[in-house]
Image (tube, rainbow, N blue to C red):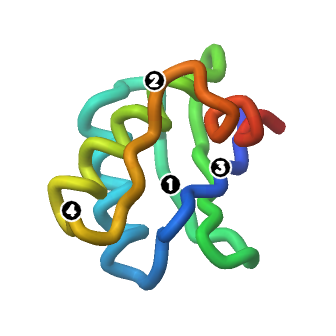
Amino acid sequence: MNLCEITIPGLRGEASIRLARSTLVRQFPDVLDVLAARRRGTVLVVFLGHERLEEWAVALDHALRRDRPWRWPRLRAKSDAVTEMRR
């Protein structure tokens, strides 16, 4: 079992954490859970196998923008924001 910490700009509150959890667990069978971390806007992804950080970040970006389109900046694959999410 592995852990990966991801900081998501604009992530706030339990509703956003629940959305992040349901998105990643549903779309990626190797993700076991998504937990709120101590730092604001940060989640811990509990997963098996290899880290799929870029794919997770894009999936979260799509889910969060659908939920609240006015709050979320668009995250592009291979962007600096995705690179900074690395451990």
Q: Amino acid at mark 3?
A: Ile
Q: Nearer the viewer, mark 4 or mark 3?
A: 4
Residue 68 on image: x %, y %: 21, 68
Q: Amino acid at mark 1?
A: Val
Q: Residues within 10 Å of mark 3 (few under 14, many from 20)?
A: many
Tags 4 and 1 touching, CB below 8 Å: no
Q: Residue 6 shows which numbered tag?
A: 3
> Which residue is under mark 4?
69
Q: Amino acid at mark 2?
A: Glu
| Along the line of sight, the residue nearer the viewer: 44 or 82 | 82
The image position of residue 60, as x and y in percent, is 38, 45
Which of the two marks, 2 or 4, is nearer to us in this view?
Answer: 4
CA gap between label 4 and label 3 equals 20 Å
Residue type beneath disc 4: Pro
Give the Cα separation between the discs numbered 2 and 4.
20 Å
Residue bearing the label numbered 2? 55
Establish if 47 lies above or below 71.
above
- Please tell me which residue lies in front, 1 or 10: 10
**Above-or-below relation of 85 to 78:** below
First of labels 1, 2 by sequence position: 1
Residue beneath disc 1: 34
Separation of residues labelled 3 and 2 (CA atoms): 12 Å
Q: Residues within 10 Å of mark 4 (few under 14, many from 20)?
A: few
